[in-house]
Amino acid sequence: MKNWKKFSFVLVLCTLGLVSYFLLNFDSRDVQNFAFAQNSSITIITLTNDNILLSEGGYSITPDPYKMTGTLTIKDNSSLDSEKDNNGIITVSGVKNGNYTVNQIGIPSGYSLDKFSKIIEIKDSSAVASFTNNPETIDSDRNNSIRNITYTAKFVCGSVFGDEGPVRPGHYDTDISIFNKQNFPIEILWNVVINDGASSNSILKNLDEETSTTIVCKQMRDLLGLGHNNEKLVEGFAIIRIQLDSMLGTEDSKILRNISKDEINLLDVQVFYTANALPTLPHEVILDKISFYIIQDGSGLIPKEIIRKPLDVTMPSELNKISNTETRIKNILAEKYNLPSEDLTKVVLRIKDVSVGVGALVDDHAISLHVVNPQAGS
């Protein structure tokens, strides 16, 4: 019996030691990273110089977004690709916060590698890296120069009415603003890629010096052939590209030919997102203002200092509906002071006056702004 007590005492000491070691070495950041890893992702888009999605691309991501050490290699439609069977788009889901360098390491024969590394940041959000591949027939002396500049913007357009969508019910809009901040005209080519769908045709747009344009949901829907069906939620990416080769015949050809990687931000591209979480647009609501007294409280739960004092409450008017004003007030009191339903009969009210209040604007919306950084392609 004495030996068993000694053994139990030693076992308790060992257990306490292990618990202390765990608490001393526990890092709360691990919990944060695990919680965040459920929602964040890195999306890699592979395109030809004609804005067509290109499959079979291979990439390296440093550091490994799951281990935060070493390098992760991934190929289009591989097991780690959340966008499997969606050629040209790779999505790595559940990644941790941090800065990552993405490099293209493989591409189908007939195309040259995009040798420019893309640096992206994950900070409680998702990020996109876009790579452009040119046919190998292009003159080798020009392969090492920057031939195009790409801006990739996420868009969300349409409505969600139930729990069928990735976002809460409401109406969502995206406005992509493009400003040519140079003192010479710039020719842009833009198209859209819908999630789990094909790439659209490209639209050519000329921007004069220091002028701006915009791309809105209506234009993207028309380009995708969806018409004006705003009740369907559409998500994807708008790809805006400057083909530098097409501008080399201008008087600024020398500037563009010698452009460096640090000078590629020729445009100011900003994305404005709006979300209205109501099923209808903001509208005026008629309110009833009710003045009353609490004459008696048999429940004992309502504060004594408001008994027999003038009180008022404002609530939405129920048009074309017959309702008991006293019951509505008692329900509000029950919610505020935790009155059981059986105690509502013990509360005696006197309605002094009911008046129509001023219309109020009901709105529940959010807005956000995102600045798109350019990526260079050879």
Image (cartoon, grey):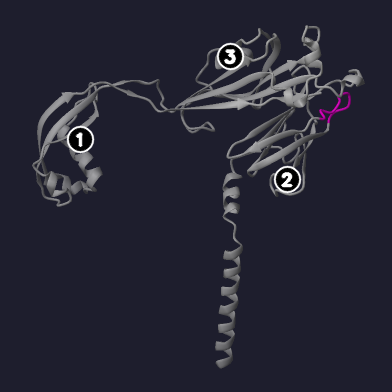
* Amino acid beneath label 3: Thr
Residue 267 placement (x, y as % from top left): 66, 18
Tag 3 or tag 2, which sits nearer the N-term?
2
* In this view, 326 is above or below 158: below
Q: Mark 2 touching mark 1, by CB under 8 A?
A: no
Q: Which residue is disc 2 drawn over?
A: 64
Residue 219 placement (x, y as % from top left): 59, 13
Q: In which quarter of the image is the N terminus?
A: bottom right
Query: Which residue is found at the position 60% from the left and 49% from the top?
Result: 34
Q: Which residue is disc 3 drawn over?
A: 214
Q: Which residue is disc 1 drawn over?
A: 328
* In this view, 92 is above or below 209: below
SS label for mark 3: strand
* Amino acid beneath label 1: Arg
Q: In which quarter of the image is the C terminus?
A: top right
Residue 315 numbered mark, or none: none
Q: Mark 1 touching mark 3, by CB under 8 A?
A: no
**Could you tell me what secondary structure mostly forms the magenta stretch?**
loop
Q: Nearer the viewer, mark 2 or mark 1?
A: 2
Q: Nearer the viewer, residue 281 or 366?
A: 366
Give the image quarter of residue 119. Answer: top right
Give the image quarter of residue 225. Answer: top right
Between the residue at mark 1 and the residue at mark 3, the CA separation in whole angstroms equals 49 Å
Residue 312 placement (x, y as % from top left): 16, 34
Give the image quarter of residue 138. Answer: top right
Magenta-colored span:
107-115
